[in-house]
Image: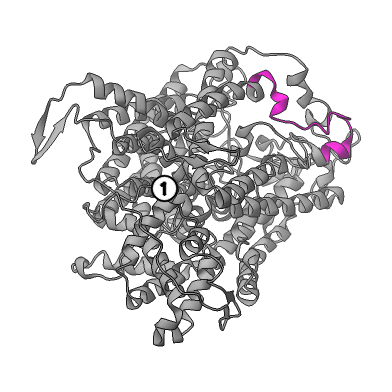
Amino acid sequence: MSDHIEIKGPVASQGVNEKTDSDGYQHSDVELPLDSRVETDLNVTEDDLAEARELARGLTLEDVRPMMEKVLVIHENDPNFPFSIIQKIQAFLGNESIFENPEKHAGLIEEMKLEAALITVNSPYAEVRAVVDNHDDVDTPCGTIRAWVIGVGFSVLLAFINQLFSIRQPMISVQANVAQLLAFPIGKAFEKILPDIGFTLWGIRHSLNPGPFSRKEHMLITIMANVSWNYPYTNNGIIWVQYLPAYFNQRYAGQFSYQILIALATNYIGYGMAGIIRRFLVYPSYCVWPASLVTIALNAAFHNDKNTPAESPFGGVFTISRIKFFSVTFAAMFVYFWFPDYIFTALSAFSWLTWISPNNLNLATITGFNNGLGVNPWPTWDWNTLLFDQTDPLMIPFFATFNKFVGAAIGCCVIAALWYTNTYNTGYLPINSNRVFDNTGALYNVSNAVDERGLFDPDKYEAYSFPFLAAGYLTVYLFFFAIYSAIISYAYLYHRHEIRMGFRNLINSFRKDKANRTDQYQDVHSRLMSQYAEVPEWWYTIVLAAAIAFGCAGIAHWETYTSPGVVFYGLALCALFVIPVGIVKAITGIEVTLNVLAEFIGGSFVAGNALAMNYFKSFGYVTCAHALLFSSDLKLAHYVKIPPRQTFTAQMVGTLISTFVSVGVLNFQINQIPNVCTVKAPNRFTCPVLWGTVGPIKVFGRGGMYTWLLAGFPIGLVVPIIIYYANKRFKKTWIRQIHPIAIFYGSLSWAPYNLSYIWPAVPIAWFSWIFLKQRYLGFWSKYNFVLSASFSSAIAVAAIIIFFSLQWTEVELDWWGNSVTSQGCEDDACTLYKLGKGEYFGPRIGEFH
């Protein structure tokens, strides 16, 4: 279809009387002209509608019916899909007279044709249409020499910086958005400087300068940076605990061969899973991946010359291009961020209510930003605060933001109830801490409960203390347990059809008659990607097998006190949860991590063995996390139309380079930084260390103090069932927007975070996703995701400069605006009850085991 379609007059339609279908919905197609109704229902611009109108003219009623049946199956419970369209599709399919006497229902039929055409030629989601091009040029340069040079350079640089500063407290990291930002001027410089010389290999010419630096080259570089900036989890999750004399003192952990084997295992094991699940999480159109849209918006701002005027909510028409808009907002946020981050930090932790009386226990507990519940009408002027969970209110849909806030408010009530009633002695502890305490309120000293090998010592433990959790931390565990069972029942009830379709496509991918299959995903982006050779399943299988072999060899060859079976445990846990967790992230932008469940199951198997439990966590949690990370990158490539095999190669090479660089830097840290990971370490290289010695059986098992938290499992299982059938029964729009997983996610967003991090996103998200999107769609489509990208990129760049120029050299501004946030209970967390000298709370010594 041509990129330029002449806009003709509106499709003729006949009026149809208002009617009620068998499900009780009322419908009317007489209030507005046909084009206006479709524009309103599907949030489409005139340009989108013009292209769909061309296709709609050729559709028949027999074409539309099966298309709408498929749309209803896939999108009926999709909160991102317009509910008004679902109602009209149900009315269309549920009324046989439409197909028996089509001349009497011409208006509804024409509307269905137009909506079917729109879904066929573009994405059904306004947020995707806003930034993702529904056309492709297969001749656009992608995996060029310059793209690989720039991509490899960023892979090395990001891996080096992030591993080097990973053990510094506070740590600093340079993420992929910085690389994406810098890659454009570098790519344009290569375009102007390099000559057009090259060579031909297998019939394809490879030139140093194939022409203008393209958006596909830019995105391929971004994907390489995205898989490279995160250092291997084992580098800080396992190696330091093994190597340091204060812990396990296992000197073999300093060997490069051991480090690289387990690093390669944990880094690559997720690739095999990502390759298998791409038919569930990448190809389907309902898998939007909101965070990917921000990355694509930045890419489009640099490479899209189209500049359509947009009506502004501030009056007049905005004609500024996306790249100029990005530049202006980037500069503004870059300058502004210096204030909340360094010059006037009270703008960040804006707990102005506690300034009235800093030592007032109840005031600080309820409204405090640092140590309280964060109940504050406007608690921050720092955009970075809203990014605490790697999302922002411009990125994820409003329903996800609001459900997250509702869940956080529920968690707030639970925490307050636990603390003020001193349930399980929480009144003796800070209300919202994520630390573990002993029976005197001091931080739990693990060395008092382990032997010289770092293994659990029951005699020392019984003479010391039971580990106590604060009210906020207890609530986090309760809702973590709930969300794990909830995501299983949610996935079955809401997405069983999509999951079944994914399995059919996975099975069919192994068949020879692939060209004759009729159940392929038929959205426009999948059709465009079908022009490129797919990655064979056996490629991913080899990667998965190699990663398993590396993991088993690393664990079995050295004295790790762990069975190689932990690798297969990680795969099994990931296989169970990766599709439900991935669907939730792809739709809402919210990721449910398996770290608590991995610790819970692993700690139950190897109680008292902290090292083995860390392995359980590494393979149980990281496998799924990496599978989702790589799936997100595959969706980026899918949207931008990067050939799948080039994406696969970029991910493999980028990860391989970053793994070797990270492990090399790790060896430098171990051998060249004096007193590393001690209080005497230079430049705050102090190292975080995981605690997992006592084990979950003693804490949550039979006879444990916190056994009641396991009630989260049945609660989580039941809640999605109640919401699902309530939606079926009452058919209210607001019930359809209730997302049980997002609610539970908000409920566990505590300790150390609180409402001050979550509430400010709600009004901003409403203004963007409800007000602007519905009333000024052209303006929202053009600028919303660009603004999200510019703010995040500006903060990342400014933070790096502030860190190296001021914080690294410990240059501080000592004035009221930086000290007022650390007064009274906001400085040192207050507790509800105090202990006298020599007193302790909880079970008496010798009464717990």
Q: Quadrant of residue 104?
A: bottom left
Note whether 674 is above or below 246 in the view shown: above
Residue 124 at x, y percent in the picture: 43, 59
Query: Along the horizontal axis of the image, is 213 left or right of 673?
Result: left
- Residue 361: say if magenta: yes
Q: Residue at x 89, y 34 (%)?
A: 360
Q: Quadrant of residue 723?
A: bottom right
Q: Position of residue 403 (x, y in %)?
A: 64, 55
The residue drawn where x is 68% and y is 45% is 750
Q: Please tell me which residue lies in front, 816 or 774.
A: 774
The answer to whether 613 is drawn above or below residue 501 in the figure is above
Asked if residue 457 lies left or right of residue 424, the reply is left
Asked whether 658 or 328 is in front, the reply is 328
The residue positioned 56% from the left and 19% from the top of the image is 803
Residue 526 point in image, percent of width and height: 31, 57
Tell me: residue 422, above or below residue 246. Answer: below
Identify the secondary structure beneath mark 1: helix
Residue type for callout 1: Ser
Residue matched to label 1: 632
Q: Is residue 492 magenta?
A: no
Quadrant where the N terminus sits is bottom left
Q: Determine which quarter of the picture holds residue 446.
A: top right
Q: Is residue 599 visible?
A: no
Q: Is 773 situated above or below 54?
A: above
> Do we see residue 204 in this rendering?
yes
Q: How is the image coloured?
A: one colour
Q: Nearer the viewer, residue 189 or 274?
A: 189
Q: Is residue 164 left or right of residue 122?
A: right
Magenta segment range? 342-365
